[in-house]
Amino acid sequence: MIDRDDALYLEAIHRFRTLYDRALAEPVREPTATVLATADARGRPSARTVLLKEADERGFVFYTNSRSRKGRALEVNPRAAMLFFWPGLFEQVEVEGQVEKVDPHEADRYWQTRPRESQLGAWASRQSEPLQSRAVLEARVREVDRRYAGREVPRPTHWNGYRLLPDRVEFWQTGPYRLNNRQCYAYESGGWRMRLLNP
């Protein structure tokens, strides 16, 4: 079991939160965007952008359709990497670790904060499956809207939150002549270590 009360681990999370808060204050769109990389049962990698919804010592949370390509990959190979890049800050952070589903009650709470249109879309989209036409998708959205007319839209059982539990957090800061600064916090041999890495 990885020690998440370790001072070095908490230092890494604090550093991330400080950077993240700076990014949120920047005048850019989607400062919560992160590239999520997964690999399927055959080891084939894939990457896509998701939005970070929570980050603390418990881990890094995002939400998605469990039947999507990434959901299926995480089912058979529950490890992932997240890459945050904030050009305005000239900084990036890479986080790697195990992934687990959040508690259903936590997912329900977040679901209730989503706009109704996004809730309808989550029901209508068969994420990652082939789509005959945009009109087909829009028709499914209208059908779901009629189904839940006048009442709350429940969370689909296949729409879940996932928490990445870090065992490696690397900070990258731009430096002159590509001599960038890299600091890596990693859980190794039963404890957390922090090392400088060559650029």
Image (cartoon, rainbow, N blue to C red):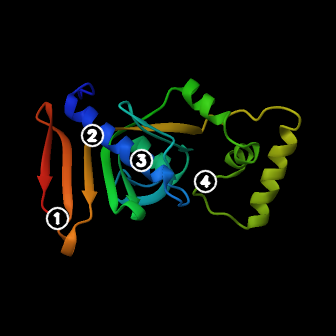
Q: Could you say where residue 111 lies in the image, as x and y percent from the top left?
A: 64, 35
Q: How many numbered marks does the figure carry? A: 4
Lower sequence index among marks 4 and 1: 4
Q: Is residue 181 above or below residue 7?
A: below
Read off the residue under disc 2: 12
Lower sequence index among marks 1 and 3: 3
Q: Could you say where residue 189 lies in the image, as x and y percent from the top left?
A: 10, 34
Distance from the alpha carbon under mark 1 to that under mark 3: 22 Å
- SS assignment at label 4: loop
Q: Residue at x 36, y 59 (%)?
A: 45
Read off the residue under disc 4: 127
Q: Which mark is residue 56?
A: none
Q: Amino acid at mark 1?
A: Pro
Q: Quadrant of residue 18?
A: top left
Distance from the alpha carbon under mark 2 to that under mark 1: 19 Å
* Residue neighbourhood size for the residue with mark 1, other residues' Cα within 10 Å, grouped as few (<14), some (14–19), many (≥20): few
Lower sequence index among marks 2 and 3: 2
Lower sequence index among marks 4 and 3: 3
Q: Which mark is residue 20?
A: 3
Distance from the alpha carbon under mark 4 to that under mark 1: 38 Å
Read off the residue under disc 1: 199
